[in-house]
Image (cartoon, rainbow, N blue to C red):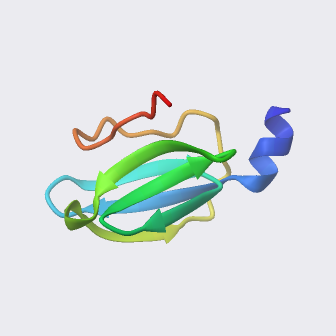
Amino acid sequence: MWKDLCQLMKVFRVILNSFGSTFVEADTYEQGTSVRFYRAGHVTAEYLASAVKSVEETGIAPQGQLFSTSPLFRESRA
């Protein structure tokens, strides 16, 4: 199953205004009042839009635990 998810997932580099770069593994993301990253339809990370300078897809292969220790990172409990 992990192999199947890895084929769909991407690694996004999120550049935060005050904290620099962080990396998030997700299959999609959306921007609105917040920037939300999704894995298999569930929110895995969320940042305030005002805190995000840019988001870009990297060519890094997903590894399963590429989450930064950024203070703005929140893991969904839903």
Measured along the vertical axis of the image, is residue 30 above or below residue 11? below
* Residue appearing at x 55%, y 33% in the figure: 65
Measured along the vertical axis of the image, is residue 38 above or below residue 3? below
The quarter of the picture where the N terminus appears is top right
* Residue appearing at x 49%, y 66% in the figure: 30
* Residue appearing at x 35%, y 37% in the figure: 74
Please give left or right for residue 52 compared with residue 38 in the image.
left
Measured along the vertical axis of the image, is residue 42 above or below residue 28? above
Residue 37: x %, y % from top left: 50, 53
Please give left or right for residue 78 compared with residue 61 in the image.
left
The residue positioned farthest toward the front in the image shown:
78
Residue 45: x %, y % from top left: 43, 44
* Residue appearing at x 79%, y 34% in the figure: 2
Q: Quadrant of residue 63?
A: top right
Along the viewing direction, whichever of 78 and 70 lies nearer the viewer:
78
Along the viewing direction, whichever of 44 and 4 lies nearer the viewer:
44
Residue 66: x %, y % from top left: 51, 40
